[in-house]
Image: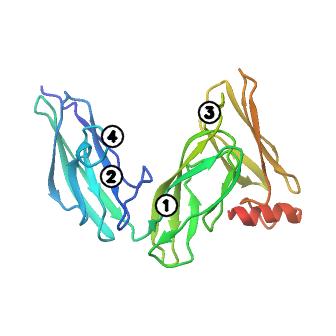
Amino acid sequence: MHILLLALALTTGSPDWNQPSVGRPWSMALKAEGGTAPYQWAVLEGALPPGVYFVDLSTVMLGSASVPGFYGAPAEAGQWSVRVQATDAEGQTAERWVELTVSPLRLQQAYIVAPVGQAMEWQAAVTEGAAPFEFRLAPHGYLPLGLTLTQAGVLRGTVLVSGIYEIPIEIVDAGGNRLQTTLTVNAYGEESSLPAFGVRLSVQECHVVAQFPEMPETIKGELFGGGPGEPVDVALTNLDSGEQVVAHYEDQSLSLDSSCEASPSILSLGRALGL
């Protein structure tokens, strides 16, 4: 009996928060697992957005590995579908439909350079679409320790640990158009024994809570305060080296429910965070 071992694992726009948008260069790699390498790829049917092509990414992107994928600057907003096929060295094949939704919204800048230890304030700018625009951190997203993102698209605060941070966000305009994309923050400064992990702050039952991504046992994240009328501090500690940084959040972007009794400072903190 001939068993099919080849399984397609395709990167897609929405799950990776890498949605294509009109006029902005975009790429998406196609990947396969199982079977016997190398794989041969083909687009069997369907259509790609105008301006997007099926290519070897190494031929159009400097430094890219030789992998198949889609590349280009979409010329139109809308939805497109293509059926792709991977064939392994033994002739086994696997197919999958890939759905692409091109947003009319475009983030003017998606790469930010920030010095560690210095206060920053950066305003996201969206081209096309209808103002006002609303910005939301993705449900699985984390912000660099010390930074907050407001609903108006202002990224502000002081990054405390150097490193590269990928921040998935969703942008919605007044007409309901959406763009799921990723901001990259390159925080430069002295090397640290602390990793470049982010934190997600939210409000639950009138208290600010902090969520961290999965971290090694030697790294500890803690929140101090966060109740009605209390300040919000978040600490990140390397238990081996003893190095610790503490971020203080004040008048940023957290909000308490209207039923919570809170001081004006905490309510202001809430309105700014826009939750």
Residues marked 3 and 2 touching at CB (< 8 Å): no
Mark sitting earlier along the chain (1/3): 1
Mark 1 lies on a secondary structure that is: loop
Measured Cα–Cα span from mark 1 to mark 3:
25 Å
Measured Cα–Cα span from mark 2 to mark 4:
13 Å
Vertical side of 101 occupied by 235: above or below = above
Question: Looking at the picture, which amino acid does disc 2 mark?
Answer: Ser
Residue on which disc 1 sits: 109
Indicate left or right for 253 with 77 as reference: right
Q: Between 189 and 123, which is closer to the camera in this rendering?
A: 189
User: Mark 4: few, some, or many residues within 10 Å (few <14, many ≥20)?
Assistant: few
Please tell me the numbered disc located at residue 195. 3
Please tell me the numbered disc located at residue 63. 4
Measured Cα–Cα span from mark 3 to mark 2:
28 Å
In this orientation, does residue 256 appear?
A: no
Residue on which disc 2 sits: 27
Question: Looking at the picture, which amino acid does disc 1 mark?
Answer: Gln
